[in-house]
Each structure stands twice: as structure tokens, then as C-alpha cells.
Image: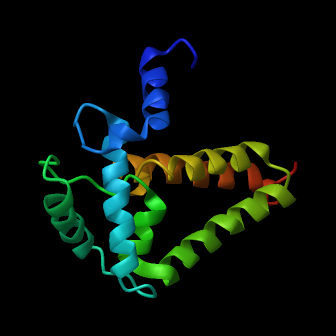
Amino acid sequence: ILLNKDLIKRFNEIKAPHTFARVPIHTSTSLRYAIWTCAYEQMKTSNKLFGEGIGDVRDMLSTCYKTNYPELEKYYNTHNHYFYIYLTVGLIGLSAFFISLLNIVFISKTKDKQFLYLALFFFLYTFLFENVLERKYGILLFYFTIMFTFNLFLREEDKIIE
């Protein structure tokens, strides 16, 4: 990590708030700051309990980008899956999402299955920076990894012993 020049550049951008004053497309930090700012502003005005619906979030964010950040010439998703869930289905959907994930955490801890636990926390961390479940490959990777390991390693009591 310390030898990667691109990563060092990104961390230096985080330390320099003046880079957020405008949104140059070639700097990912300022781009994400603009995207998260719009997402946060939309979260304050959206329906807190039920969200705005799956189809409406794109229009809301695009309007915010055109108004506040005209440099953003195309649509960008929220780049935070938790923000996206909150905007689309509100607190009810976000709560259901967390309950389902907590159920997997609880089961992996009680059955002492560290791989499942670590894989889930990898995805939980990734959700902070990307909308993994908004793309088909992200969905496939998440559910294959989680459900495959869940079923493979936790079904020991179903195996027939000969």
C-alpha cells in the first residue's frame, strides 16, 4: 500500500480539503465527495421511512449533480450502498438489510465459521465505497460467496455419516 503511488495520491487528496472546492473528474476523492454530498442532501429531504423508490433515486441524484456539480456530465450512483438502500427503501428497507446481515454474523459466530464472518465483513466494508449489489456481477459475487460458504460450511449436521 505504501508503494502504490495512486493510493498515496488519494490519501493526500483526503488531507487537502481545498481539492473538494471543485470537482475535477480525474480525482476520485473529490468526485466521491461531490457524490456523497448530493446523496446526503437527498437523504435529508427524502421519505425517511419508505424511501423514494428504486426508479426515482437516479433522477434525484442527476438533478442534484446538474444543480450543484455541473462538471459531472454523467450519472453516478451513490458510491455507498447504505446510502442507496436508505434512499430507495428508507429506514424499513435498511433495517431489513441489516437484520439479514446480522443474522449471518450471528450464525457465523455461533458456529465458529471465520471464513463466512470475514467474507461478510469484507462486503460490509466494501458497501461503504461501492454499490456492490446494484450490479449483476456484484450480486453474483456477494450471494455466491456468502450463500455458498453459508451452505457449504454450516450444513454439517445434514451430512450422512456412514
Is 52 positioned to the left or the right of 64 in the image? right
Q: Which residue is at the front of the view, 154 or 69?
A: 69
Q: Residue at x 52, y 74 (%)?
A: 94
The image position of residue 144, as x and y in percent, is 52, 49
Is 38 positioned to the left or the right of 105 in the image? left
* Quarter in which the N terminus is drawn: top right
Q: Which residue is at the front of the view, 72 or 147?
A: 72
The image position of residue 151, as x and y in percent, is 66, 55
The image position of residue 40, as x and y in percent, is 39, 66
Q: Is residue 33 visible?
A: yes
Q: Is residue 135 visible?
A: no
Q: Residue at x 44, y 35 (%)?
A: 16
Up/down of 11 relative to 147, above or below: above
Q: How many marks can you see?
A: 0
Q: Residue at x 34, y 43 (%)?
A: 20
Q: Residue at x 54, y 11 (%)?
A: 3
Is 36 positioned to the left or the right of 124 in the image? left
Q: How is the image coloured?
A: rainbow
The image position of residue 52, as x and y in percent, is 31, 81
Up/down of 156 relative to 24, above or below: below
Up/down of 53 relative to 25, above or below: below
Is 159 positioned to the left or the right of 34 in the image? right
Please identify the quarter of the rendering in which residue 18 is found: top left
Q: Which residue is at the front of the view, 54 or 157?
A: 54
Name the residue at the front extreme: 18
